[in-house]
Image (cartoon, coloured by chain):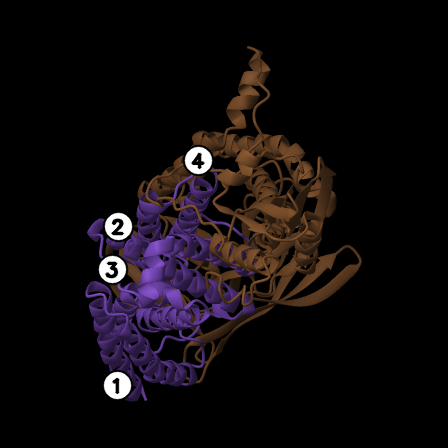
Chain colours: A brown, B purple
Amino acid sequence: MAKKKKQSVTEPVKRNDEEELPASDGNDGNIIGTIWDFFSSMKLGIILLLVLAVVSIVGTIYIPKDPMTGQQDFTRFYNNLFFRILMSLLAFNLLVCSLNRWKHIISTLKGPKLQVGESFLKNLKTGAVFQLKEDAGATAGRLQDILRRQGYRIFNESREGNTYIAADRGRWGILGPYLTHISFIIMIVAIMLKFSGLVGFEGDLATVVGKTHNLREVNKLQNVTTDEYFDIRLDKFETQYRPDGSVQEWRSSVTVIDKDKTFPFVIKVNHPLVYKGIKFYQMSYGFYFAGKVNSASGGAKDFALMTNTGNSYTDAPGTDIIFLPEAFNRDSNKVALRIFKGQQEVGTNEAELNKPFTYETASITFTEATDYSFFSVKRDPTVPYMGFGSGLLTAAMIFSFLVKHRRIWAVVKDRDGAAEVLMGGLSQKHKADFQRDFDSIVYEVKGEKGGAERGLR
Amino acid sequence: MIKTEILLHWGAVTLYIVSAVLFIYSFAFQKPEYMRWGTIVAVFGLLPHSAALALRWSDAGHGPYLRIYEVYSSDAWVAVVMFLLAQKWRPAIRSVGTVVMPAAFLLIGMAVMSSPAIRPLPATFRTYWLLVHIFFAKAAFGSLLLATGLAVLFLVRERTALPAAGGVTKRLTDSGFFDEASYSLTGFGFLMLGIMIVAGAIWANNAWGAYWTWDPVETWSLISWLVYGIYLHLRRTRGWRGVRAAWFSVFALVILVFALFGMGYFYPSQHSPYISD
């Protein structure tokens, strides 16, 4: 029967089966060494993760407002200097830990050390000591055959009549957590670059049916050279409905015009236009109105308005009368209009296209009424890095979960013609499974039947 | 059709309550044989539950992932299925029905108390990445509920020092199996949560051109992932196990539940069509 050292699971205790972290070489008072040691601390990493989680929570409670629009802006909090410093510290901590750990990774990949002390083996939680009435060489050979059959890589050495065996399986599994951390560094750098404003831009563009707009008209455009400018024309905007009346799709049919090159494209939700690394996403839509408004006392002025935007109404010059067009009916050729005096709504009416509509001393004439489509326009060079980082993260996590790194050591001693076996094993994860498999190996070495069934399952 | 759905849902609620009572009785009074009955009743409860969700899918024309009625019910369904699969894989896990079945009937109960009206699928939801995102969200919730359920059972055993009753439960107490299984399931849940966040980022990038916008639900999902990351690091490198780890697991699930179910009550979000009533 395999020996199982009983140990309380209530209190955290340092045992041989815990993570073996590379020990610090000591810095002898060297300031750089001290800083390096500080950042290579796993404890620091855990504290930084905790602080990052807490600060992220604060960012969902205290939500700053955009000074321009007065709207709550979730991103502003996370763009502040403190948050960036925190992310930088975490990235640096991960980098230093990864560099520090590299030697340990290489050493583990090379294989488990044969030179382990008997006290080390005896202290392992998973272990066994037993004697067999047979030749020590035959026992050692059988143990190695069993391990090899189970996919273990074997290292052995004979010294002073004893056979020392070290075996491992799933060694590449240790790369899982390592690559997870590397992918985290890549993603932190990509996110910091994205929000730094040094690369790419996030802007928007309202396009009117039939009109051609140049890229330079994009709001908040930056990090784009004039050589990259091109035109985009909105040919048609349509809303498609389901039988139940709900919206199924918005479609903006556009034409891209870049010097001699011209091509059509339909921008839909989840289907952006991508040209020269710049993406146009369907965000919203509405009616566009243009015309002239005048009053007896204040003269006349032209207007161009868009519904659902900050520029959706016009006042009559020299009066407190405000016209707010809401919709356009193509069948009747009329504009639905709301009228205000100051803050007070005083009526609704319809104004026919190209015919003046008069309210008290003010008059408004709509000469143009059509659809507009509002695009979010972006260039984000960090997307490929983020994609690589998240792909690596996913693969590394799956790898880490599926590939189990296991190590088994054994010393087979010759005791006057009999064999004494001291065995021990380590697995960082799935310890119950490992214990069961270890027991099964022990039973098989001892020549007992039903090893697997007698394990811990 | 909605009437039939609700009747089927109530059938499931009733059977889940019976199952939960059998599990709690079995665990509290050390009668392992009742756990078998609890499991059988859970399987019978899953039948009307599955039928209700299938009807819903057919009626709505999309998966059960819009508004509380669909989300809570499908989350409960995934949790019960994962529990049944897990106990088949490792019979010793069966005791966790003591926590999972009450959670399942609470979720499905809240679902049937909310509006069952069908919500049309928003245009931004018409992408396969949404399905990946939602599938992994539910798998994460199911596995992390199981993990915390095991941690809770561990705590109850530690606090009450219930005597081992033989059979399944004896094995559990002797080996610290609850603790180890909770750790393994948390690792699995952490993976599911990570894939959920990545799939959500890909979807957001395709829909809005921004893979990360610090949307409150998005941020709380990241917070949950970080908290579970801390848990795994504490276990692996700081020797946390047993009572401390179990309490941390409970704390982490509270954060996750708030991220998945609570945020909709506090903030407007891109996820509003998904989490609101």
Separation of residues labelled 3 and 4 (CA atoms)? 75 Å
Q: Could you tell me the amino acid type at mark 2?
A: Glu
List the residue tagged with mark 3.
A345
Horizontal side of residue B228 vs A160, given as left or right = left
Q: Amino acid at mark 1?
A: Leu
Nearer to us: label 1 or label 2: 2
Q: CA distance from mark 4 to mark 2?
A: 21 Å
Q: Nearer the viewer, mark 4 or mark 1?
A: 4
Splitting the image into 4 quarters, where does residue A448 fall?
Answer: bottom right
Pointer 4 residue = A14
Figure check: A89 above or below B55: above
Mark 3 belongs to chain: A
Return the disc, 1 or 2, that comes first in the chain's sequence.
1
Looking at the rendered structure, the secondary structure element under dot 4 is: loop
Total count of labels: 4
For disc 1, the marked residue is: B7
- Asked if labels 3 and 1 share a chain, the reply is no
Nearer mark to the viewer, of 3 and 4: 4
Single out the mark in the foreground, 3 or 1.
1
Using a 10 Å C-alpha cutoff, classify the residue at mark 2 as few (fewer than 14 neighbours), some (14 to 19) or many (20 or more). Answer: some
Residue A120 seen in the figure? yes
Position of A174 compared to A299: left or right?
Answer: right
* The image quarter in which residue B241 lies: top left
Up-down: is A290 above or below A204?
Answer: below
Which structural element holds mark 1?
A: helix
In this rendering, would B255 be left or right of B222?
Answer: left
